[in-house]
Image (tube, helix red, strand yellow):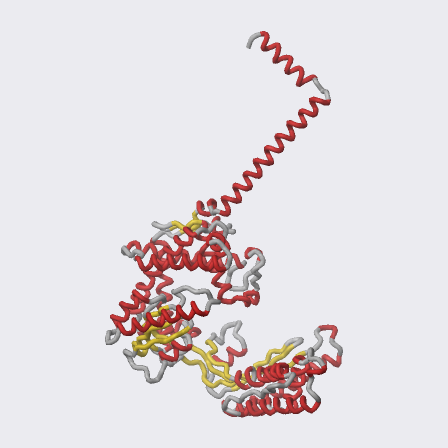
């Protein structure tokens, strides 16, 4: 640097060091403001970029949640499986989810779980997702090892699922991406969903064949051993039960001595009634007769009608209220109806007041009587299919100890008491059949489902709905005609191509396992092997083929249990064979 340059530099330094004027203070302030503004702008850009990356799943997609020898499950795929478990739970229980302690408006990580060993609801759904992914990876690896791949029909089915998501999204005012994000978590894309469906479909394809092979290999000795090892799954008892209840109107220290005495007296009275029924119940028929006579008390029924009527008619205006005589006559009809219904083996029609100004309120009052005396009273006496529990266990209930103790037999009767500070119950239990296996018949059936929804329609558009139904019916009739005179193998072959259900053949179907129309056709007494037909249900049209009788119900259950245990062992061994592992950090930090 030349002398002149050094001199200018020194002067410049002197200006910055020595000048303390207001002007330079203002300049410094301006520079500080500019720097801060730049930093804020940069921070804003970073936040926007971070939000964009998060919403688009770039971070989660880059994370590895699980791996096996040949496959990788990303963070976004984990989110799909996790939220699928969550959505499935909500679809199953709907508004009743809150009864299990699940608040959908709060973080799952902040809510204690009431199921199993999971600490929080997040843990519950994540454990289920992890187990599902483990099984899928094991099955997909096994499929790959045997050269099993998705075919055109499998891929078509996946595309249809994606299409269905898009249509549902549009119907509800979402974009496809927005709807998928809302269902399965921020950043989960169509591509993620498709990858998950492809992996799941491949796993399912292998599982179907493997389970069939396992079922074919189950022996009678294994079935008998399963019965010994799992009586809780195969044994149950049938009973008649009636409950006498005493309640205390005021709880705790607030109750007066008179109220406490009234509760004690009511308990003694209800206990005495229970003992009276126990003594009278020399047979199932006598049990029912006693309860019917006990309930058939005109004064008690009338008092309950008065209570129901008071509640139902509380908002009636004076011009719509019945006269004293009209109400007396209506009440008499209600009492007579209940009395007759209690003693009749046939269904008794409830009284109606067509044209009366208070008909709706009267119907409500009578409905309350029906519920208490018929539905919850005489018709609710049968309590069947009570699953076996070990009566020697430390936490065995009094009911379990009575029903499943050694030597328990039909005709045994007992009073099971449960007394509390505010409520006490005395349940009279009559054993109609002690611990036993379900010896009912099962049946095997093949079907080809043609869903009326495949044509696509808006639920509110009746014409389109009818058109879709007609189209499905015509297709079912065409298939049935094509199969005329063909055997089961031909039916199964065509079914694999045409059906819109996951299975063509269902084995060991129990009564009421299927929807009503399907069940009624299958268990028709005149049904013979080789029978075919078409059945319409809420799912669409089913082209049916009756194969024949299956295993006895308990053996079918035991056989499935053997297969489940075999499959569970296979998963554990395969997880090691195919090196299935999970990233605990990713699994624990989703969302």
Q: Is residue 316 left or right of residue 222?
A: right
Residue occupying the far front of the picture: 463
Give the x, y percent position of residue 487. 24, 74
Residue at 29% across / 57% down in the picture?
Answer: 148
Residue 470, percent from left and from top = 38, 71
Residue extending furthest toward the top: 3
Image quarter where the N terminus lies is top right
Residue 4 versus residue 149: which sits nearer the camera?
4
Task: Name which residue lies at 55% across and 38% down.
Answer: 45
Q: Position of residue 31 (x, y in %)?
A: 64, 27
Horizontally, is 338 left or right of 202 in the view?
right
**Residue drawn at the location 34% of the way across and 50% of the way down:** 70
- Please, is residue 530 above or below residue 571 in the view? below
Count how many numbered circles sit on residues in the image: 0
Q: Nearer the viewer, residue 467 or 330?
A: 467
Judge by depth and name the residue closer to the eye, 115 or 310: 310
| Residue 282 shows in the view | no
Q: Quadrant of residue 452?
A: bottom left
Query: For residue 264, what is the image quadrant?
Result: bottom right
Task: Relative to 24, say whether 216 is above or below.
Answer: below
Q: Is residue 150 above or below residue 391?
A: above
Residue 328 appears in the rendering:
yes
* Residue 572 location (% of width, % of height): 37, 58
């Amino acid at each position: 640097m030349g002398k002149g340059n050094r001199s200018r530099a020194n002067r410049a330094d002197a200006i910055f060091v020595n000048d303390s004027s207001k002007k330079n203070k203002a300049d410094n302030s301006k520079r500080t403001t500019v720097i801060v503004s730049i930093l804020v702008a940069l921070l804003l850009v970073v936040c926007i970029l971070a939000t964009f990356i998060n919403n688009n799943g770039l971070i989660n997609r880059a994370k590895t949640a699980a791996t096996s020898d040949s496959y990788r499950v990303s963070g976004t795929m984990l989110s799909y499986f996790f939220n699928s478990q969550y959505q499935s739970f909500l679809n199953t229980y709907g508004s009743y989810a809150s009864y299990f302690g699940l608040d959908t408006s709060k973080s799952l990580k902040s809510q204690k779980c009431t199921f199993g060993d999971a600490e929080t609801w997040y843990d519950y759904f994540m454990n289920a997702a992890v187990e599902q992914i483990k099984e899928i990876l094991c099955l997909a690896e096994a499929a790959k090892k045997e050269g099993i791949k998705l075919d055109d029909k499998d891929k078509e089915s996946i595309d249809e699922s994606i299409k269905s998501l898009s249509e549902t999204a549009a119907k509800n005012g979402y974009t496809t991406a927005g709807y998928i994000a809302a269902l399965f978590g921020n950043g989960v894309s169509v591509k993620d969903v498709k990858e998950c469906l492809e992996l799941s479909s491949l796993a399912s394809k292998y599982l179907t064949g493997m389970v069939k092979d396992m079922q074919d290999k189950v022996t009678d000795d294994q079935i008998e051993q399963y019965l010994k090892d799992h009586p809780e799954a195969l044994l149950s008892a049938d009973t008649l039960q009636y409950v006498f209840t005493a309640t205390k109107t005021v709880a705790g220290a607030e109750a007066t001595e008179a109220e406490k005495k009234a509760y004690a007296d009511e308990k003694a009275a209800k206990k005495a009634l229970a003992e009276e029924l126990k003594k009278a119940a020399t047979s199932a028929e006598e049990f029912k007769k006693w309860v019917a006579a006990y309930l058939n008390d005109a004064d008690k029924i009338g008092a309950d009608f008065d209570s129901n009527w008071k509640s139902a008619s509380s908002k009636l205006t004076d011009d719509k209220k019945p006269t004293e005589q009209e109400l007396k006559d209506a009440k008499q009809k209600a009492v007579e109806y209940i009395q007759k219904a209690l003693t009749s083996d046939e269904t008794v029609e409830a009284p109606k007041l067509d044209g009366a100004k208070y008909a709706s309120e009267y119907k409500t009052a009578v409905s309350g009587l029906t519920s208490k005396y018929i539905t919850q009273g005489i018709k609710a006496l049968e309590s069947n299919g009570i699953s076996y529990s070990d009566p020697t266990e430390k936490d065995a209930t009094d009911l379990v100890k009575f029903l499943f103790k050694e030597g328990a037999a039909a005709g045994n009767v007992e009073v099971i008491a449960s007394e509390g500070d505010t409520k006490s119950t005395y349940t009279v239990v009559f054993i109609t059949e002690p611990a036993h296996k379900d010896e009912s018949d099962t049946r095997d059936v093949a079907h080809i489902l043609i869903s009326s929804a495949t044509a696509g329609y808006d639920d509110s558009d009746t014409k389109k709905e009818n058109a879709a139904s007609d189209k499905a019916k015509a297709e079912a009739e065409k298939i049935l005609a094509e199969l005329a005179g063909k055997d089961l193998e031909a039916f199964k072959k065509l079914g694999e191509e045409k059906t819109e259900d996951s299975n063509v053949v269902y084995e060991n179907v129990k009564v009421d396992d299927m929807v009503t129309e399907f069940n009624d056709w299958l268990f028709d007494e005149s049904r013979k092997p080789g029978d075919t037909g078409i059945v319409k249900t809420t799912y669409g049209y089913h082209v049916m083929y009756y194969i024949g009788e299956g295993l006895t119900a308990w053996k079918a259950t035991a056989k499935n249990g053997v297969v489940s245990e075999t499959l569970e062992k296979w998963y554990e061994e395969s997880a090691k064979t195919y090196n299935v592992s999970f990233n605990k950090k990713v699994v624990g930090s989703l969302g």
